[in-house]
Each structure stands twice: as structure tokens, then as C-alpha cells.
Image (tube, rainbow, N blue to C red):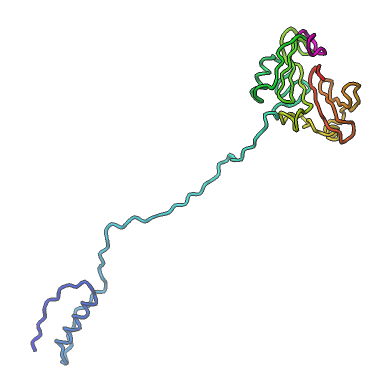
């Protein structure tokens, strides 16, 4: 038998290459003593990969870092800026221009609930000094203006404030307190704890009352430690 070595075309799979090689070896070596040395099989396969790989899908998780400024906002009542003082209200002192003071408070509390306009003191508020007086009210807070007081004369100016009595179920506006946090509803015990030198007394007209200074006073429900503040006055109070 004449063995002819035919050319073997490259195959796609290593398994086919090995099968053909075994077949040729069996056919040509058919029981002879001579062992034909075959060319060594390739030790590695060349795999053709796509030169361009599909882009990897990367999921990026972004951490949200809170800013240095807290997102929690604290609502402050406009009335809290109106500190009840013996020499004024909020940042304004007694004696300041009347129109300017009305504008300041209106910007905080809105349009007044009532405004008497300037009227002769002989017609209204007869206890007030000067020739004319005006009361402007925001809820339970009333500001007094006139042309004469212990703070100025000959010009219209702010000379006193009244806070209370409460007309509804709660003070309006909420927030005004003294610098010691005494306000409408504070007890006599709280009042004396903050202001140990406060005077508690019985007035012939107003009844149970208190005085922190000559220009800062008020009315109490009663003189007991559980009695509460029902009205407060600052400045040259002339309306009770």
C-alpha cells in the first residue's frame, strides 16, 4: 500500500486536527515496526478576539455629603424680636419718630388691626400728656404716640407700649417677652425668680399688680405664687 501524504487543510477545531492525524498514522504505520515521528502539535491556540470590546457598564454610586449648613430651619415668631423693655420695644427706644416706629412694627406684624389716628388728648386718653395722641394696635399689642412725654416734646414720637389683656384664647402676637422671658401668662413665682426685686402690690384701680421699674409694670390675676401676668406696660403708660 502506497501512502500518499495529502495536504490537510487547516481546520477550525483542534479535535478535527487530532482525528486526521490519528487516521494517517494508522493507515501508514499499519502494523510495521517503524514508528513515524509526527510533527508536534501546537502547544497553544491562537484565538482571534474582537479588537474592539463593548464598553463596560459601570454603575457609580455617588454619596450625598450634607452641606455644612443645617437644612433644618427654625421658625422664629416676628413677635420674638419685640423685646418688652423699660426704655423701648425691640431695638427701638422711646422717643423715636412715630412714623418710623409704625413702619418698623408693620413690617414685622403686618397691617395694624386698629389705628385711632391723632386725636386731642382732651377728647380721648385724658391721662396722656401733650395735645394729641395716637394708639396703633396689633392684636393685644398697642403702641402709643404723641407730641409730648418724658422722652420728647414738640414732635410726634413713640412713648409707650401696652401688651394685653388677651382678647382671644392666646396672646397676639405671640413672642414678645422681657429680657428675662417674662410675658403674658408668666406666674408670680416665675416673675420673682427672674426679678427678685420686683414689687408685688395691690393697686386701688388696677388690682393685683407688679412693678419691675418705674417704666415697666403690669397687672396680675392675683398676688399668689400661682397668679399670672395678664397685662404689661412700658414707658409713660397713660392707658389702663
- Is the stretch drawn in magenta largely helix, strand or loop? loop
Percent x, y of residue 91: 70, 23
| Depicted 2 relative to depicted 89: above or below | below
| Depicted 147 relative to depicted 213: above or below | above
Percent x, y of residue 229: 82, 30
Magenta residues (range) = 121-131
**Of 153 and 48, the residue lying toward us:** 153
The residue at 55%/44% (across/down) is 66
- Residue extending farthest left: 2
**Residue 232 seen in this snapshot:** yes
Left or right: residue 229 versus residue 38 is right
Q: Quadrant of residue 82?
A: top right
**Of 49 and 83, the residue lying toward us:** 83
How many numbered marks are there? 0
**Residue 178 seen in this snapshot:** no
The residue at 67%/15% (across/down) is 99
Amino acid at each position: 500500500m502506497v501512502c500518499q501524504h495529502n495536504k490537510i487543510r487547516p481546520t477550525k477545531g483542534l479535535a478535527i486536527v487530532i482525528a486526521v492525524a490519528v487516521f494517517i498514522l494508522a493507515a501508514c504505520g499499519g502494523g510495521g515496526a517503524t514508528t513515524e515521528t509526527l510533527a508536534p502539535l501546537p502547544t497553544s491556540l491562537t484565538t482571534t478576539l474582537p479588537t474592539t470590546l463593548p464598553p463596560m457598564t459601570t454603575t457609580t454610586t455617588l454619596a450625598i455629603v450634607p452641606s455644612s449648613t443645617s437644612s433644618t430651619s427654625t421658625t422664629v415668631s416676628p413677635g420674638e424680636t419685640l423685646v418688652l423693655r423699660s426704655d423701648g420695644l425691640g431695638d427701638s427706644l422711646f422717643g423715636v419718630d412715630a412714623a418710623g416706629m409704625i413702619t418698623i412694627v408693620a413690617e414685622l406684624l403686618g397691617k395694624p388691626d386698629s389705628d385711632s389716628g391723632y386725636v386731642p388728648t382732651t377728647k380721648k386718653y385724658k391721662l396722656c400728656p401733650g395735645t394729641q395722641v395716637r394708639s396703633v394696635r396689633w392684636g393685644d399689642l398697642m403702641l402709643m404716640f404723641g407730641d409730648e412725654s418724658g422722652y420728647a416734646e414738640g414732635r410726634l414720637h413713640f412713648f409707650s407700649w401696652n401688651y394685653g389683656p388677651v382678647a382671644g384664647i392666646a396672646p397676639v402676637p405671640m413672642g414678645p417677652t422681657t429680657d428675662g422671658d417674662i410675658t403674658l401668662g408668666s406666674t408670680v413665682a416665675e416673675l420673682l425668680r427672674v426679678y427678685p426685686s420686683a414689687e408685688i402690690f395691690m393697686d386701688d384701680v388696677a388690682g393685683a399688680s407688679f412693678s419691675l421699674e418705674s417704666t415697666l409694670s403690669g397687672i396680675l390675676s392675683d398676688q399668689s405664687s400661682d397668679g399670672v401676668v395678664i397685662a404689661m406696660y412700658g414707658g409713660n403708660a397713660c392707658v389702663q
